[in-house]
Amino acid sequence: MLKQVRLLLLASFVSTYAHAKTFELDDYDENNDGKLSRQERVNLRNDLGPYGTEDRVASVFFALNKLERERGNPDQIPTEDVKAALFPDAVKCDLSQRVFLRDSLRNIAFLDCPENREKSGGASISYTEDFENGGSSGTLKGVLGYVLIEPGRVATPPAQRTMQDVLDDAALAVFAEVDGTLNSTQNHEGFARFGVEAEAWTRGIFDQTIWDLAGYYQPDLNFDTHAIGAELRVTPVHATAYLNSYLKPKDSNRKFFFQVNGILDAFAFPNAVNSSSIEDSGYVWLGGRLGAVYEDKVKALPNGFRLSAETLQFWDALHGETTNHYSAAAALFLNETQTTSLGVEFVSGRKHELPQSRQEQFMVKINFSY
């Protein structure tokens, strides 16, 4: 099983995909001397052999044979030379970025490589003017995150990593999130969250699994209620299954993947101790997100476009209450890096963060990400 997991990671790295941070060729350097011996190369080839029918794996298999022929099959080949030969277009993963701007905390991966990060789900703003009845409103949705502890200081360095090292990397960040509508003639709708989040990437059944644990303070946008809570998110990553990841051939602009998160979110309202409604005192929500994203570039739209849909489903373990929220969006990217877009979105249902409020909105939005 460990070899199969290691092979899946190796095979998946051949194509560019989201949430694929580390290349596990170093695992074959059993004595950590920075070189692959003949036997270590045999181990690598044996792992590749049963999967040689896959084009992306076959290309690695033949590239390894070519390298050995060119060098006369020496006793030792530097690991970095093997990497360069097998993956000439591989880029080093720079995790120095500290500031992140996205539409939701669920769409931030602090430990992902820059070229693989999902940037198109950016923070958004929309404005509505009611000329008939008077008044205006603005809708804000986004999160700003700042990494406090740099990645790479917690986990085993890649050159010294073995398959027994479950933890790939970890980071700690602070964040401020807002999701709601500010109205000029009536109460505001929505919530904000301010907190600290720890993120860890582990190996196991999937290519990788992302674990996020956040502690937060949550007021509504009128500051009438205040909650304190904690959220645990689990994000499985599997490139060949397009699970929170994708395989993208070099000659294609098309990207498709499923967004799946398992979520446990528990919070309490300290100022509602004397409330007659037990639901107001707190919730323990179990559920998650299921969505799909499709992106492409066509001649008429050289920067590309994005189509997405998702549903959020939750059940409150304390009171048996359920919430359902649905959204569908389309956006046109305004720049080549796809960090700015203009789009429309329809949302319907109740979010578990404020289960007493229901949304039914159609919005034109400008999205920004960093």
Image: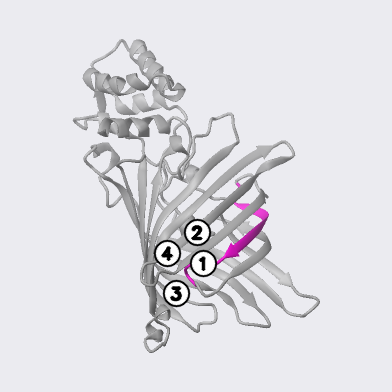
Q: CA distance from mark 4 to mark 3?
A: 19 Å
User: How is the model colour-coded?
Assistant: one colour
The first of marks 2 and 3 along the sequence is 3
Instruction: Look at label 1 and name its amino acid.
Output: Lys
The percent position of residue 125, horizontal first and vertical second, equals 63, 64
Q: Which mark is residue 351?
A: 1
Answer above or below: position of 46 versus 292. above
Quarter-wise, where is residue 74 in the image? Answer: top left
Which of 37/195 is in front? 195
The first of marks 3 and 1 along the sequence is 3
**Mark 4 lies on residue:** 315
**Mark 2 lies on residue:** 312
Instruction: Look at label 2 and name its amino acid.
Output: Leu
Answer above or below: position of 108 versus 74. below
Left or right, 155 with reference to 246: left
The percent position of residue 146, horizontal first and vertical second, equals 43, 62
Magenta region, residue range: 338-354
Q: Which mark is residue 218?
A: 3
Instruction: Look at label 4 and name its amino acid.
Output: Trp
- Badge 2: few (under 14), some or many (20 or more) residues near its Cα, within 10 Å? many
